[in-house]
Image (cartoon, rainbow, N blue to C red):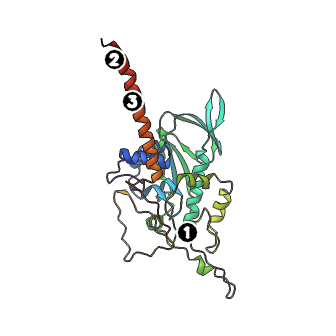
Amino acid sequence: MKIIDQTPLLDANGQLSMMNRAQGMLKYGFSWPANLQAQEKVIALLNKAIEKNHTLFRNQRLGASEIIVPLILIGSSGIFVLDATPLKGFYRARGEEWGTVSNGRFQPASINILSRTAKLAKILQVFFERQGFKLTAPVEAVLLAADPGMHIESQRPAVRVVMSDAIERFAAGLVASRLVYNPTEVGELVERLQRPIPSRRAEETAPPAGNTPQVREQPSFIEAEPSRMQSILNSPKSDALIEKGGEQPFLQEPSDMDFALDEEPSPTVLVRNPYTPEEDAEPRPLKSIAPKPKRYFGMLSWQIAVLAFVGICWCVALAAVSVFWLIPTLQAQP
């Protein structure tokens, strides 16, 4: 299985340094390192059973949008959006409901990972449709429990739920399943995910002469904020945006589901079983690039301020503990 890792802040060996770990937690949330560990466990299990004809993208950004998909598996068996969760405990997945179970009582979770995974699968399908693909089968959403301490009571969940002890069976089932895409189609899907082509709907849907509206350029993509991505997925209008995304005319106002395909996608950070796409002969000029925030040591100013505040608090705490232990010692001296 070919693994293309787009995870930010990893070094050349795929490791996360302490500085990058702190930066990632500030940027993506305190659960970010745990999510990466869950992905690594799942990838290792999948890689045991899936040897060829499949490519796995990790933390892939869709075009130049603000949507990042945790795991995308593309192969002869189909297209799958995989979400590896590091959670532990007892949970219930019933329809689109997701929450914990304690003493027989159901408590909805603050983050509905079932709904989130299902929406990511729909978004990925819209992405490929806007690339001109007529998918043979819909993109399937799968929730994978990376920790053996997680137990899920499933009652017709909105996405496929796979426990940790069944991940290898799930992978083996993909290998043995019927052929959905041939190798040529798989290669095209992988290529389009890495190098999306610009939309040509402006030419196809051009209005009559004399009534040409002003074409608004796609906003250039700078950097995706996780809070922005969550607002897109959790928005009450997200389902409507997803359903209309595949048919959105190029001349309409840009929306949250606009993949901004005129911009270059982020480069691959790490590739295992490497695949090196050819570089463009001439770089494309960028349009309307907004100035990027100034960084110091790879971090924004507010991130450095937070680290400095945490460091000061840590020093104050150490000083207080030292004084607490020194006072009895000084009093004991004659």
Q: Is residue 89 above or below residue 33?
A: above
Element marked by disc 2: helix
Three-letter amino acid code at the position of disc 2: Leu
Q: Residue at x 55, y 60 (%)?
A: 124
Q: Amino acid at mark 1?
A: Pro
The C terminus lies in which quarter of the figure? top left
Task: State the mark number for residue 7.
Answer: none
Q: Earlier in the sequence, mark 3 or mark 2?
A: 3
Against 279, residue 117 (above or below) is above
- Circle 1 sits on which residue? 219
Which numbered circle lies on residue 319? Answer: 3
| Residue under label 2 | 330
Which of marks 1 and 3 precedes in the sequence? 1
Q: The disc labelled 3 sits on which kind of residue?
A: Ala
- Direction front: furthest residue: 334
Q: Are marks 3 and 1 in contact (CB under 8 Å)?
A: no
